[in-house]
Amino acid sequence: MKPVAIPLVLLEADLNIRKKLSLDHLFLHYENISSIQIELVSVDREEAIRNYGKIISDKDVPILAGAIKCGAEVLISLDRHHFFTEKVKKANFNITIQTPGEFLKKYFSQE
C-alpha cells in the first residue's frame, strides 16, 4: 500500500501541529513525510465540489476527490463529523474510511 495525499492535507497537518504541538513534533512530522515518500495528487477544487459537494462538506471535498482520483483503498481521517456519515457510506465509493488508529490496528497489528 502506497501513501498518497493532496497538498492540502499536508498543509493542514502542518498548521495543526504548529497550533497544538511543539516544534519537535513538527520536525518529526517532516522526517516522517520524507521517509515514507508520499505521492502528491492534484485535485481541481471546483470540479470536486461539483462532483461530491452534495455528499461531503466543501472543505473536505478535495480530500475525498483525491482519494477517488488515485484509486485509494483506504482514506485515513480523524474527521468523524464529515467522513463517517451515512451520505458518504451510501455513496459507495469503494474506499474504506478509517481513523489512524483503526488503520494501524488492521494493517500493522501483531495478531
Image: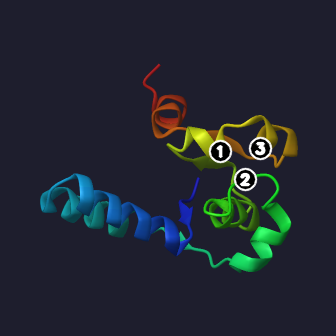
Circles 1 and 3, Cβ within 8 Å, touching? The answer is: yes
Q: How is the image coloured?
A: rainbow
Label 3, on which residue? 88
Q: Decide if residue 35 is on the left or right side of residue 61.
A: left
Label 2, on which residue? 56
State the residue at coordinates (57%, 38%).
80
Q: Decide if residue 40 is on the left or right side of residue 30.
A: right
Q: Secondary structure at mark 1?
A: helix
Measured Cα–Cα span from mark 2 to mark 1: 7 Å
Q: Secondary structure at mark 3?
A: helix
| Numbered badge on residue 83 | 1
Q: Amino acid at mark 2?
A: Ile
State the residue at coordinates (55%, 66%).
5
Specify which label sits upstream in the sequence, 3 or 2: 2
Q: Name above or below for residue 97 compared with residue 1.
A: above
Q: Amino acid at mark 1?
A: Phe
Measuring from the top left, give residue 107's x and y in whole percent: 53, 35
Q: Decide if residue 59 is on the left or right side of residue 48.
A: left
Q: Amino acid at mark 3?
A: Val
Measuring from the top left, give residue 14's x and y in whole percent: 33, 66
